[in-house]
Amino acid sequence: MGSQEEQSLLEGGTYSQVESSGLYTGDGSVDIKGNPVLKSETGNWKACPFILGNECCERLAYYGIATNLVNYLTKKLHEGNVSAARNVTTWQGTCYLTPLIGAVLADAYWGRYWTIAAFSIIYFMGMCVLTLSAAVPAFAPAECVGSVCPSATTGQYAVFFLGLYLIALGTGGIKPCVSSFGADQFDDTDPKERVKKGSFFNWFYFSINIGALISSTLIVWTQENLGWGIGFGIPALFMGMSVASFFSGTSLYRFQKPGGSPLTRICQVSVAAFRKWSLPVPLDSSLLFETPDKLSAIEGSRKLLHTDELKCLDKAAVISDSEKKSGDYSNPWKLCTVTQVEEFKILLRMFPVWATGIVFSAVYAQMSTMFVEQGTVMDTSIGSFNIPAASLSTFDVLSVIVCVPMYDRFLVPIARKLTGKERGFSELQRIGIGLFISILSMFAAALVEIKRLQLARELGLVDKAMAVPLSIFWQIPQYFLVGAAEVFTFIGQLEFFYDQSPDAMRSLSSALNLLTTCLGNYLSSFILTVVTALTTQGGRAGWIPDNLNEGHLDYFFWLLAGLSFINMCIYMVCAKQYKSKKAA
């Protein structure tokens, strides 16, 4: 595997000797067999193409379903606009809730690699079932006859939703792990590799949107023109390619050992602090319990320095008189290390920043629901060619594909000179810029809807469920602005929740980040339900009726813009007060 010196270090040296040699990573990463890994032969950009290829194909599969799902529900399963939008956002929300399952398994037991591998199989099975639900005639309701559209049977719904929610479960093991697994390929203790990690997150999101671009163009066109069976089958094929790409890079990967259940450690701190509630916290933090070794007691984690916030939790690390007398410090339900206490503090400090991501995700959810429904009642023709309304999400993807290289190659170097930060902007600054841009996207959507409704009134189309002669390309600014907001907020969140999380909680932190998308989708569903209930009282059509020409979708967009502005103001306060973690 290398020189005699390298072999002797591997066979007989301690890990600290291996680390200090400079040949190996200093962040505790190992190969698939558990041995320390050579920097020159593993990780870094040489391992990333397999991970980025995996993510690109998997996202193509996901967006191949999600982008046009609302149209499948309305056109093939004959659901109403509100019901279809609610089903889409509920499913998308679930896709961002299940990562909590994958994160716990990855951090506590399997590690990120094996969690991705196992859940990819479940994901692929779901894609196959979904394809069958659209391809086999018995699994879909009959076509409409005039205005009469037969509802889907219970069995047809069962097959469809079985496939859909197997995908939701499968994605739960991939989403919280793959970005962290990619970032694990860069050694935190190496300044050169640490800078590259920032670029990795940019290109990781870039690969996501390459997959989304193919989905919103080729896949959506296939679904609308060649049939849903083929339209779902192609994403299933790409999901198979995703699995193959991931396994192909196994020999080049760096692995982080699972550190045990992070949820258990959080509970241990809470219980230990409660048990010692009456004990005073010493003024000298060096008197708090910590292991004397260089590495922390948590597998795969470096030590964290003590911080002065949330002193009540420090009681968990106070050594009682009875423990001093017995010399027994082994029960973590009675005594926790400073690092373990600081893990919990970090999660609590990140919580306000995390919570402000929910409203942003609710805005993002409109691309696959209300933006699409708005587009279906606009002029979608270019000559004799009709553009599927869902294909306008291409401009969101193009926005990301254009903005990521510009941000990475041009904006970061300029910002680096101005701010002195190695990544140009801090993660919190980057997130805040995206929140502001998201408000502008809702403004743009509302203005387009105002113009569309004005034309509907002028042409006498209010009572007719038909498209208004306003080009769908007027939607481009709102999609483009959402894409620009993503480049700042979503990538900023990826960096923030990876860099600020404790070493042994990175999958869980990624899952919590994804949970904001879940809750954003659920929030969107909740707002839709409340708005529909309130605005349809007294027999009124409401803001979002099946015939959007007699509704007021613009009011809904203004509502989201207002909520986004309030959310941004709260975020600015939280970001100003946030204090970064301190590694030992």
Image: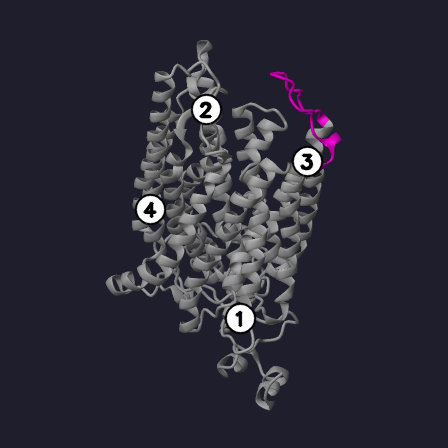
Q: Earlier in the sequence, mark 1 or mark 3?
A: 1
| Left or right of 392 on screen, residue 133 | right
Would you identify the image quadrant in which residue 426 lies?
Answer: bottom left
Mark 3 residue type: Ala
Name of the residue lying farthest toward the front: 383
| Left or right of 87 on screen, residue 560 | left
Decide whether residue 150 is among the magenta residues: yes
* Mark in the foreground, 3 or 4: 3
Near-viewer residue (43 or 73): 73
Q: Earlier in the sequence, mark 2 or mark 1?
A: 1
Q: Please give the residue where the numbered disc 1 appears in the rendered image.
A: 46
* Mark in the foreground, 2 or 1: 2
Decide whether residue 173 is among the magenta residues: no
Cα separation, mark 4 vs mark 2, equals 44 Å
Cα separation, mark 3 vs mark 4, equals 46 Å
Cα separation, mark 4 vs mark 1, equals 38 Å
Q: Please give the residue where the numbered disc 4 appears in the rendered image.
A: 574
Rendered location of residue 350, percent (x, y): 41, 50
Near-viewer residue (394 or 534): 394
Residue 580 visible in image: no
Tell me if mark 1 has few (under 14), some (14-19) or many (20+) residues whose alpha carbon lies within 10 angstroms of its own.
some
Tell me if mark 4 has few (under 14), some (14-19) or many (20+) residues whose alpha carbon lies within 10 angstroms of its own.
some
Q: Coloring scheme of the render? A: one colour
Q: Which stretch did the figure color magenta?
A: 133-154
Cα separation, mark 2 vs mark 1, equals 50 Å
Cα separation, mark 3 vs mark 2, equals 27 Å
**64, above or below 258, in the image:** above
Tell me if mark 2 has few (under 14), some (14-19) or many (20+) residues whose alpha carbon lies within 10 angstroms of its own.
many
* Mark in the foreground, 1 or 3: 3
Mark 1 residue type: Lys
Q: Please give the residue where the numbered disc 3 appears in the rendered image.
A: 134
Name of the residue lying farthest toward the right: 138
